[in-house]
Image: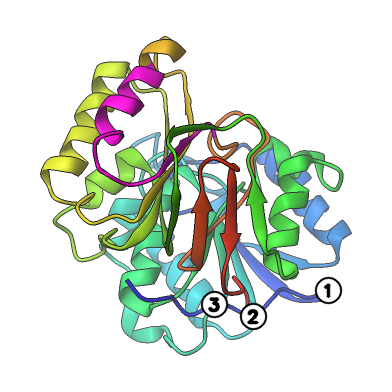
Amino acid sequence: MNRLIPPPALRPGDRVAVIVASSPCNQTKLAGGVAALKAFGLEPEVFDSARAAGTGFDYLAGDDALRAADLTRALADPAYAGVLMAGGGYGAQRTLELVDWSRIDPGAPKVVAGYSDVTALLEALAVKLGWGSFFGPMVACDAFHEGAGSYAFDKLMAMITTPVTELRFAGARAIVPGVAEGVTVGGNASLLAASLGTDTSLPAKGAILFLEDVDEYTFRLDRIFTQLRRSTYTDGVAGILLGTFTECGDPGDVERLLADRFGDLGVPVLAGADIGHNIPMQTYPIGVPARLDTEAGVLTLLKPALA
């Protein structure tokens, strides 16, 4: 795949929309995250979806129409330089069904960041608009609540405001040694599998594919990975970067599964990157040409993630 359009860097004084496309978020942590953004110099505006409790289903923030309207407005209105997701959970796939893409200018990309369930949105931005985006911590997460000085907060802020050139993964393990080049794609494995066959699934052919997940039994991870293989999603990938698989069973079993499902693809594979759930995480850019060196444990960005 080709490089996606990078957004302009966020600058002090920029307005950013804080929204939810999935589940209700923790309001105390949201307040802390908003305060951290203000302290950093940004001007966050919290949309109704980020305040909404469950209606109809307690796992959905408000209704689908509210979340889709907030997302459409945040992406379309030039007053906002960025859209920072407040939380994940479940519901982004439902939200995408109602987004009015015709209102959004593909030539005016903006910083969009989130992870977990937000994977569905990041894929959609690439397919529908050609935008690059960022798989990183969210406003109502602990990282934001802690603010400046927090590893995850600082890594995200650096990625969306400055020209980051590489990500280093201390302690990562080369399942298959080697060097690969391609455009960065991926996210939460469950969400990537759930998007297959839809009009927002982003192909991984020729790409550096990142995968992580949480709260899946090992056999369910096996099913997800096998679906990605059998659907041909992994056919032709250039390299694979594997993050955390928190609460997914015995770590030794997960490690063997990763080697089993990805070690025979004939491409370099690196496991143990500090990107994913329940850890101080780095931010992974989507849509950027990069080089993955699995023996050195380094992802080098060959083009800037920001315009």
User: Separation of disc 2 and disc 3 at Cα?
Assistant: 7 Å
Residue under label 2, please give it: 8
Residue under label 3, please give it: 6
User: In the rendered image, which quarter is residue 190 located in?
Assistant: top left
Label 2, secondary structure: give it: loop
Q: Mark 1 and mark 2 in contact (Cβ < 8 Å)? A: no
Q: Position of residue 294 (x, y in %)?
A: 51, 43
Q: Earlier in the sequence, mark 3 or mark 1?
A: 3
Residue sitting at x 33%, y 27%: 259
> Nearer the viewer's eye, disc 3 or disc 1?
3
Image height check: is 162 above or below 296?
A: below
Image height check: is 208 above or below 188?
A: below
User: In the rendered image, which quarter is residue 258 located in?
Assistant: top left
Give whichever of 155, 204 is nearer the camera: 204
* Residue 262 falls inside the magenta stretch: yes
The three-letter code of the residue at mark 2 reads: Pro
* Residue 249 falls inside the magenta stretch: no
Q: Position of residue 44 (x, y in %)?
A: 72, 64
Placement of the C terminus among the 4 image quadrants: bottom right
User: Separation of disc 2 and disc 1 at Cα?
Assistant: 13 Å
Placement of the N terminus among the 4 image quadrants: bottom left
Residue under label 1, please give it: 12
Q: Is residue 103 left or right of residue 25?
A: left
Q: Is residue 128 left or right of residue 303?
A: left
The three-letter code of the residue at mark 3 reads: Pro
User: Separation of disc 3 and disc 1 at Cα?
Assistant: 19 Å
Give whichever of 15, 57 is nearer the camera: 15
Residue sitting at x 78%, y 43%: 32
The boundaries of the magenta stretch are 254-272
